[in-house]
Structures are given as C-alpha cells and as structure tokens.
Image (tube, helix red, strand yellow):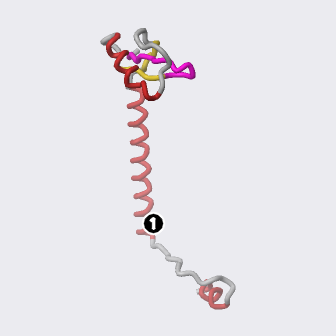
Amino acid sequence: MILDQHINSGLLPHTPFHFVSLDAQAIDNMEASHRKLSAAVLLLISMAAEMGLTQAKECLFQSAKFRGPCYAWSVGICNDKCLDEDKANTGGKCHGWELKCMCIKPC
C-alpha cells in the first residue's frame, strides 16, 4: 500500500515487479527444498572426492624408443612407442618444456 503511494507520487519508478507476501507453508516448502538441494550438492561433492582418491596415480618416465622432440602432432607416435616398450604402460604423452615423450605407468 505504502509502496503504491510512492510509485504514484513519482518517488519510485514504476516497475512490473510486485512484492508478494509468502505464507508460512510456502516458506517451509522453500526451506525444505533448500535443504534437499544442499544435501544433493554435498553428496555429489563427496562422491567426486571419493572417486579422486580411488584413482591410481600415474608415474611418468622418459621413453627409450621415442627419438627427438615430442610435439603436439607427434603425441600419437609417443603413445604407440610407450605401449610397445612395456605392457605395463598405459600410454604416453608429450611433457614438459623439454618436449620429451613420457610413458605413463600406474604407480
């Protein structure tokens, strides 16, 4: 009511938004939804953290078969050389500012 008087008097600009009063039931529903959303977010965070802890660490060592600098376009060759070197290797990647082909093995 007072807000309408201020709008009509020109003290406040007219906006299409109106203040809505919520009853206790609506507030309780919003609080319950907020609690459920918070619980879901916490569950997702804990699941992501647990998955990160269960993954094996990667150990890197320089390839003995790959020769020369390892550029982005030669990463496939690096990967193949590492897989051929040792059956325990899971792949290879170009690594570091020295552009070396590094083989990946689970630690």
User: Residue 2, percent across and down?
Assistant: 62, 85
Taking depth in this image into account, of 4 and 106 the one nearest to the observer is: 106
Is 27 situated left or right of 89 in this image?
Answer: right
* Residue drawn at (43%, 40%) of the image: 45
Quadrant in the picture for the N terminus: bottom right
Tell me where residue 17 appears, x and y as whole percent: 53, 78
Magenta region: 95-106
Left or right, 82 with respect to 102, comes to left
Q: Where does label 1 land, which residue?
A: 27
Q: Is residue 30 above or below residue 5?
A: above
The dominant secondary structure in magenta is strand
* Quadrant housing residue 63: top left
- Residue 63 versus residue 1 in the image, above or below: above
* Classed neighbour count for the residue bearing mark 1: other residues with Cα under 10 Å, few (<14), some (14–19), many (≥20): few
Residue shown at 42%/25% (left/top)? 75
Q: Which residue is at 63% across, 90% downward?
A: 8
Query: As drawn, which residue projects farthest toward the left?
Result: 87
Residue 54, quarter of picture: top left
Q: Position of residue 53 (x, y in %)?
A: 42, 27
Mark 1: secondary structure: helix
